[in-house]
Image (tube, grey):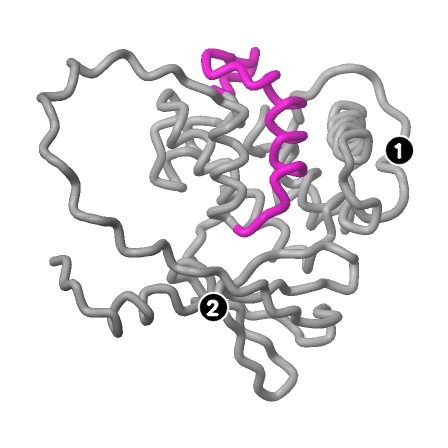
Amino acid sequence: MPDRTVLANVWIPALLAAAALPALAGETAVFTSGMRLHVDRHEEADGIVRLYHAGAVTEMPRSVIEAFEPDEETSSSPVPAPAAAQAAPDPPTQKTIDPRAMVREAAGRAGLPPAIVESVAKTESGFDPGAVSPKGAIGVMQLMPATAKALGADPNDPAQNIEAGAKLLRELLLKYNGDVVKALAAYNAGEAAVDHYQGVPPYPETQHYVNSVVRDYLNHGGAESDAGSGDAGSSSSGSDGPGKGAGQ
């Protein structure tokens, strides 16, 4: 995988009123491709736009951004009343892993439409945390060990696996200026292959993979404009890309 350097309760009415004031939630960058990504804020200078999100900064040509839309304001949670004394809690029980819910939560943290990340996870592994591909890709998001290491994640930990996969997908969408087809192809076959062919590589497995993700996304209510236009090409079955991508 390429080197990624980018990346005391006080009962005073006035305080209670302040706690209920709305807080800015950020904004949405709308790409010319139709893809929409959440960012905390942006800056523009000399034809370059800087997108800020979760402490990371990404630069790209301003021309690839159609518009910025302010997110709806969200209200802070009201100050809770002092809790009454409670009996000791029961011993903790084994927490049930819900990969689909984890995927949606990770998508939100990454500023991505949850449906597109869900479609990737479904196509990659069927949301199976224990999935291992013939080429060694691991978990729900089918991360290769080297890719997971570069992202600072343990691929065998479902939460880290899903978080890293969503992060990688966001990075690829930013690199390819919101082009979902290219980003998906790179997730599967690797950025080098997409850069070499300047688009989806002529690998049947990758073409099938891209078409499967986009089809599932559209079938589950995704916006066609978000998924991009065109077809990745004819394909045979299989989701393991031959290049060095996340899901091999």
Does dot 2 land on a helix, a strand or a loop? loop
- Determine the residue positioned at 49% across, 44% down: 167
Q: Is residue 50 above or below residue 215?
A: below
Counting from the top left corner in percent of width and height, residue 220 is at 76, 31
Mark 2 and mark 1 in contact? Answer it, CB < 8 Å. no
Q: Is residue 44 among the parts visible in the rendering?
A: yes
Q: Is residue 106 above or below residue 87?
A: below
Q: Of the residues shown, which amino acid type is indicated by label 2?
A: Leu
Left/right placement of residue 23 relative to residue 81 reads right
- Determine the residue positioned at 32% across, 17% down: 95
Q: Is residue 207 above or below residue 2?
A: above
Q: Is residue 127 magenta?
A: yes
Residue bearing mark 1: 233
Counting from the top left corner in percent of width and height, residue 33 is at 78, 58
Counting from the top left corner in percent of width and height, residue 245 is at 58, 34
Q: What stretch of residues is rendered in magenta?
A: 111-139
Residue bearing mark 2: 24
Q: Is residue 6 among the parts visible in the rendering?
A: no
- Determine the residue positioned at 73% across, 75% down: 63
Question: For the residues marked 2 and 1, what is the alpha-carbon distance in whole angstroms?
Answer: 42 Å
Left/right placement of residue 180 relative to residue 42 reads right
Q: Of the residues shown, which amino acid type is indicated by label 1?
A: Gly
| Few, some or many residues within 10 Å of mark 1 (<14, 14–19, 20+) | some
**Screen quadrant of the C terminus:** top right
Q: Is residue 120 magenta?
A: yes
Does dot 1 land on a helix, a strand or a loop? loop
Quarter occupied by residue 203: top right
Q: Nearer the viewer, residue 196 or 21?
A: 21
Q: Nearer the viewer, residue 22 or 5?
A: 22
Q: Nearer the viewer, residue 248 or 216?
A: 216
